[in-house]
Structure formats: structure tokens, C-alpha cells
Image (spheres, grey):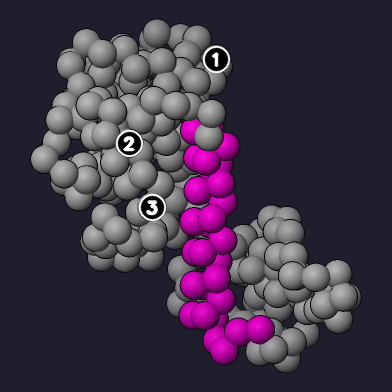
Amino acid sequence: MNDRPKTPRIAPEPRATAGEARPHRGRDRNRAAFVAAGLALLEKNALADIGVDDIARLAGLAKATFYNHFADKDELAAAVVEHVRFDQRALILRHVEKIDDAARSLARAFCVALRYRLDHPGRARLLEQSAPPYKAAVDPINSGVTRHVRAGLHEGRFTIPNVEVGVIAILGLMHGCSSFSEPESTFVYMMRAQQLSALMLRALGLPVAEAEKIAAQEADIAFGPDAASADIVELAREQSR
């Protein structure tokens, strides 16, 4: 492998008590180093093209130490995917934690998820490749989406038959995003997020005008002023194709 990837910094997970933390501190650091190295490599390479030697070399640790933490590289890959999933979820939660409207929360979460895909295409690919089959609305992996859909139904914001129907609609749109070709600009990606989140809100039962207004506002927030003020030529070029 010619190019040496830059290893992301991943903080070790804290232990339960201070007394227990000291003996495990080095072990936690080593595990975090292996996960960070695995992430850097998997963002650009297929798992089949990566060896334990590559992972250990990038982590700066002995190959034998790798097996103190993982049975094989497949187990490491699972840990990498879980880290990426947690990283994306934490970002979304920071964005929606102070929003008290279910419709806005879902629109913001949807746009932030697409922004994460734009900023971290390698990580997004890992999530798509490891996506589990459809899980029921009550499954913990869908807990955030489920909570907001349930709140929207309770508040009368959504007119869908039940929570599960809403979760299926949202996850279907999100998974469908992987079929898009890569855009040439952040502005095009922002417009895509706005259009899809508006479609999501309409599917949940919001009036067209309100859905489009909320989607536009939340896409602007998720993608920032640089994308919102991009040259309109970008949009014209995209639409002319």
C-alpha cells in the first residue's frame, strides 16, 4: 500500500470507576488505536485488501497485540462500523436535542445524515455495506427515528396509520440515497437533502407548503451558509444535465 492514511483520533471508552480505570487504560488505548487504524484503511480500501499487518503497522503496535483485542480483521471491521454509527448518531443528536417539534427534528436529522455522507464518503460507504436487513420500529437501532415519529403522531403533526409505517418510509428514503451519483458541489447536495426531506415530511402527512418550508430551513442549517450562498450557476449546471 503506497499511501499511508492519516489515522483518525478515537478516544478510548471510559471505565466504570476510577479504581478500575488505571489497569485498563493501556488496553483501552491500544484497542482505540486499532479501531482508528482500521477506520483509516477501510475508508479507502476493501476489507479483503487489508491485512492485520497493515492495521498493526498503522496503529503503531505489534501484530500480536491485535489478537488481544480482536479475533480477526472481521471483528475489527465490525468495531469500526459500530464506531462510525455511534459517531454519526452523536452528531445527529447534537443537532436535534433542543428541537421540540417532531417534524423539524426528523428533517434536521435527515439533512445532517446526508451532510455526514458528503463529509465522510468512506464512512458512509461502510455504513451502507454493513446495513442490517429491515428492523422493526421497536428495534433499538431505530430508536431515534421511532421516538420522533411517535411524538409526531401524538401531537397530531403526522397522519400516518402507525409508527412502523413512518419508520419504514423514512428508512426507505435514507437507504435510497446510496443510489445517487456523487454531486459536484455541496450546494447540489444541500438541494438534494432539502427535496428528499420535504418528500419525507409530506409522506408523514404535513401539508406541502409547510413541508417544503421546514425542509428548506433545516437543509440551510445542516449544510451551513457556504452551501446556501453558493453560486446559482451550480444549480443551473446540475439541472441542465
Residue named by callout 1: 225
**Quadrant (top left, top right, bottom left, bottom right) of the C terminus:** top left
Q: Is residue 205 above or below residue 29?
A: above
- Return the disc, 1 or 3, that comes first in the chain's sequence: 3
Q: Is residue 199 left or right of residue 80?
A: left
- Return the disc, 2 or 3, that comes first in the chain's sequence: 3
Q: Nearer the viewer, residue 127 or 54?
A: 127
- Residue 61 spot, x, y in % from top left: 78, 79
- Residue 203 spot, x, y in % from top left: 16, 31
**In what element is the residue under mark 2?**
helix
**Quadrant (top left, top right, bottom left, bottom right) of the N terminus:** bottom right
The quarter holding residue 29 reads bottom right
Q: Residue at x 62, y 60 (%)?
A: 40
**In what element is the residue under mark 1?**
helix
The quarter holding residue 150 reads top left
Q: Nearer the viewer, mark 2 or mark 3?
A: 2
What are the residue bounds of the magenta stretch? 69-96
Q: Does residue 52 show up magenta in the picture?
A: no
- Residue 4 spot, x, y in % from top left: 69, 61
Q: Does residue 73 show up magenta in the picture?
A: yes
> Disc 1 to disc 2, how far (Cα)?
30 Å
**Which label number is shown at residue 143?**
3
Q: Is residue 59 left or right of residue 98?
A: right
Residues at marks 2 and 3 touching, judged by CB atoms closer than 8 Å: no
Q: Amino acid at mark 3?
A: Ser
Residue named by callout 2: 151
Q: Nearer the viewer, residue 125 or 195?
A: 195
Most distant residue in the left direction: 161
